[in-house]
Image (cartoon, helix red, strand yellow):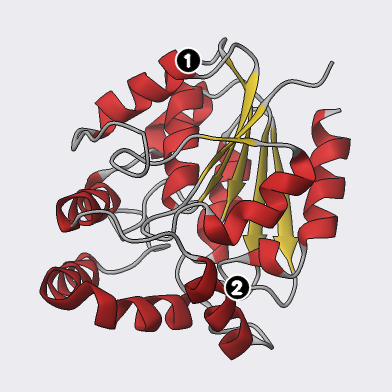
Amino acid sequence: MKPPIVMLPGWRLGRGPLQPLADALGAEWYDLPGYRETPFTANFADAVTRLVATVPHGTILMGWSLGAMIALAAAARAPHHIGGVVAIGGTPSFVTRNEWPHGLAPQALAEFRAAIAEDEPAMLPRFVGGFNRGELESKTLTAEILATADPAPPLEILLAGLDWLATVDLRAELPRITAPVLVIHGENDPLIPCAAGEAIAQNVPHGKWLPIPNAAHAPFLRHQAVMVEQLSSFFW
């Protein structure tokens, strides 16, 4: 019997863009704190604890972007409870830090946070269009994501997620993840550098690196078949 797969969406966009992949895998959902029915917490450690307490033993967590960071943190926190992780467009640190050049400059994230606080609806198309740069069908993909995105949660919740991206650093926790980790990353991802995803695979004990050619930050939109095939062969 295959273990359950639980999908964790990325910041702001919710389930919609990931729904076809979830359907193909028969995955269940765990929404980010404050989204849909998941209780809100501004504390990242509390969010991780609640996730671990909610999912069954042996669950494979599949997270996209910020969702991947939470999945990795949960696997490090509970290595004997989480059965595996699929990190799509993930990173151990979203911003650059000492000895970590594979991220966004902290000042750039702070400016984006201020712009979201001022006018989130106006910033959303720019955000989605920006992370689709590098895709051959970037305009089409951007329109698809915007059309399927869940409604925005309250601003407080959006800003809390951006604060996590500014502060969370999982580099030291990666070696504690004993479950298998499949890292799927678009080779042309302009938001989270490919090297950030590759570092995850290199620093967990049982990692596999799967770069997706000609894909950006949302590789599941045009490369679902290869992702499902690789996930099946890696875990089963």
Q: Secondary structure at mark 1?
A: loop
**Seen in the image, is 24 located left or right of residue 96?**
right
Q: Residue at x 38, y 38 (%)?
A: 170
Q: Secondary structure at mark 2?
A: loop
Counting labels gives 2
Could you classify mark 2 by the number of other residues whose Cα lies within 10 Å: few (under 14), some (14-19), or many (20 or more)? many
Residue at 29%, 52% in the rendered image:
165
Mark 1 / mark 2, whichever is N-terminal: 1
Image side of residue 172 versus residue 175, left or right: left
Residue 7: percent from left, percent from top: 57, 40
Q: Identify which residue is drawn at 27% across, 27% down.
A: 45
Q: CA distance from mark 1 to mark 2?
A: 31 Å
The image shows residue 108 at horizontal and vertical percentages of 23, 74
213 on left or right of 7: right
Comparing 101 with 165, the one in front is: 165
Q: List the residue tagged with mark 2.
A: 216
Residue type for callout 1: Ala
Instruction: Give above or below for 130 relative to 66.
Output: below
Task: Kindly identify the amino acid type of the residue bearing the numbered disc 2.
Answer: Ala
The label number, if any, that marks residue 173 in the structure image: none
Query: For this rendering, which residue is in front, 173 or 157?
Result: 157
For disc 1, the marked residue is 78
Quadrant location of the C terminus? top right
Which residue is located at x 52 percent, y 19 percent?
Answer: 55
> For mark 1, does the 10 Å Cα neighbourhood hold few (<14), some (14 to 19), or many (20 or more) residues?
many
